[in-house]
Amino acid sequence: MTQDPVYFVHISDTHIGPTADYALNGHQALPAAQRIVEIINALPQRPDFVIHTGDIVTDPSPEAYRLAAETFAQLDVPIYYVCGNHDTERDIRHYFEMGPHDDAADDPAYLSYTFDVRGFHFLVIDARGPAEIDPQGRLTDSQLELLAREATVEGPPLVLFIHYPVHPLNSIWMDQNMLIQNGQLLHQTLLPARRRLRGVFYGHVHQHMQTMKDGILYSSVASAVSQFGAWPNDLTTYYDNEHRPGYAFVHLLPDRTLVHQHTFVRPEMA
């Protein structure tokens, strides 16, 4: 049987604040999020869904989540969310409607779930660690056990969504501050499924980045509001104002994965 393609839009790190004029590094977050919704709704190819890989808001306040929920409710396609280090599982469940899915976490404090689209299987993993390691992530034993149950040799084509990068990114600041602390264990757990794993998609780094490791694609997306700088010898981070916000349009084809990276002109609210 020929497998039909699946298309999705990858967005991340919208960092919406409690008011419409909230700005991150001088750039207003809400107008950028509203613009990306308009762009998605007008795409010439309708995606099957949108995945937001976390940091929906900057601080988990009711006001910020209400603004975010009102914004993403305007999408014409289903949307799914990953819990970022600026989010909480409780608030995502409370404020947002998601597409059809099945909860997969043994611990309800973690937002981990699965869903299926035309023969492709999608897994969302929650890698938030304790507050004292933020902004790093860490997988709990229960999350690793869930990953092991899903990452088997046999099964349908598999896609993983997570907030944090798994592998070092050859940037001093990024590698000291942004990774999943036990990311190499995560990678080892995925290896049995490498032949059916079509990609691991993440956010957090506020940049388009790709890593290939043991045949597995790890792909991040630019922030929808403001980008980090991350050159190899950077000892600290900064916001790179020369680069636009962005998103990715991902093609899951029967024999390959294509990631089209896009940017858009940042709108500013008067």
Image (cartoon, rainbow, N blue to C red):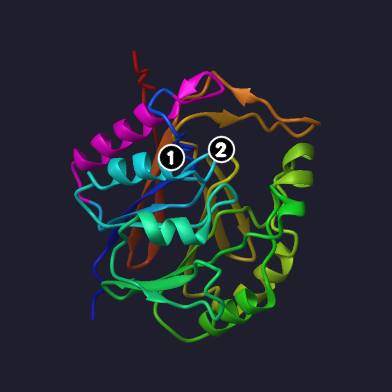
Q: Mark 2 against mark 1, which lies toward the viewer? A: 1
Amino acid type at mark 2? His
List the residue tagged with mark 1. Answer: 64
Q: Does the magenta stretch include residue 27?
A: yes
Pinpoint residue 179: horizontal percent, then vertical percent.
70, 52
Q: Earlier in the sequence, mark 2 or mark 1?
A: 1
Residue most toward the top? 270
Q: How far apart are marks 2 and 1 (CA)?
A: 20 Å
Q: Is residue 184 magenta?
A: no
Residue in front for this viewpoint, 216 or 233? 233
Q: Which residue is drawn at 43% across and 45% down?
A: 62
Check the image and report above or below for 98 versus 197: above
Residue in front for this viewpoint, 36 or 268? 268
Whether residue 43 is visible to the viewer of this picture, yes or no, is yes
Residue in front for this viewpoint, 222 or 34? 34
Q: Residue at x 25, y 53 (%)?
A: 47
Residue most toward the front? 62
Pinpoint residue 210: horizontal percent, then vertical percent.
57, 48
Magenta segment boundaries in residue numbering:
22-46
Amino acid type at mark 1? Ala
List the residue tagged with mark 2. Answer: 206
